[in-house]
Amino acid sequence: MNNISVFLVVKNEAHNIERVLESVKDFDDIVVVDSDSTDNTIELAARYTDKLYNHEWQGMAVQKEYAKSLCKHDWVLNLDADEELTSELKQQIVDLVKTDNDIAGADIPIQEFFMGLPSHSAARMNSHIRLFRQSKAKYGSERFHESAVVTGEITPLTGRINHYGETSIEVKVAKTNTYSSGKALDKFELGKHSSLIKLVIIFPLMFVKSYFIRRNFLNGRRGFIGSMVNAFYAFLKEAKLYELEVKRSKK
């Protein structure tokens, strides 16, 4: 597929990389930026593209900005190694890009798989701007949960990206710990301060949001477990921000 570049930032993703690249193999420009993988991620990726680069890890947003800069087309699609482009979304992307329009990007729903099963069809999905014109977009400096800031009109698409990253409770909790540390440090470096009130209320509020408002109760016990971990992630961000402030005060 011409006029669209796909870019991925990866590290030690041999268990995922073939699935995502298989889903985009008919795109003519695929960029893979690795960060010193110790498995055979790069060897597997080489079956699909010769645009393979290594870039020292500097945070997810910085890595993605670098990968974006290596794309040859203005329209770019970002995927993670543990994701997959669905055929429905692929067709919507092709139709959007070939149309003469002033749209700068597209908001795409993410179908989450937790413990090997997809979320209930009536549960509310997250969505992210993953397709955009690189000339109108730029990443910041976030360590995790980064988003491209796109200037211009954003259109919603209904086709989905499948996300298989949370294969088990152990994996989800490990990501929660890692990501909360990165987000707390991001906030600390921006001069944000911890709040006792937020520390007290953030867990129950985020549980209600995840379990009831986003309708994770439809996923049964998986939904309850996932919502508890999601709420704990929000709590950990605040707790770790406070911890950073305590460490600074002792210097």
Image: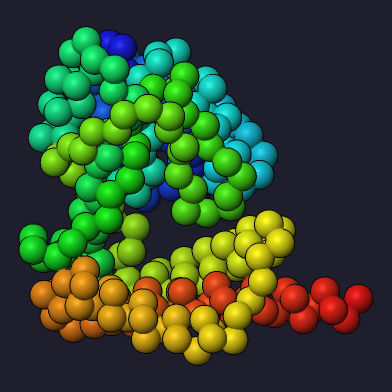
Vertical relation: 3 (above or below) 41: above
From the viewer's perspective, is 217 left or right of 61? left
Percent from the top left, x then y, of residue 63? 57, 38
Q: Would you identify the image quadrant in which residue 205 lies?
A: bottom left
Toward the right, the furthest residue is 251
Q: Would you identify the image quadrant in which residue 206 lies?
A: bottom left
Vertical relation: 198 (above or below) 117: below
* Residue under the point 27% across and 11% down: 2
Percent from the top left, x then y, of residue 233? 46, 74
Which quarter shows the N terminus?
Answer: top left
Can residue 5 be seen at all in this image of the molecule?
no
From the viewer's perspective, is 27 left or right of 69? left
Q: Would you identify the image quadrant in which residue 123 lies?
A: bottom left
* Residue under the point 58% across and 50% down: 142
Colour mapping: rainbow
From the viewer's perspective, is 21 left or right of 183? left
* Residue under the point 37% across and 27% down: 152
Percent from the top left, x then y, of residue 7? 42, 30
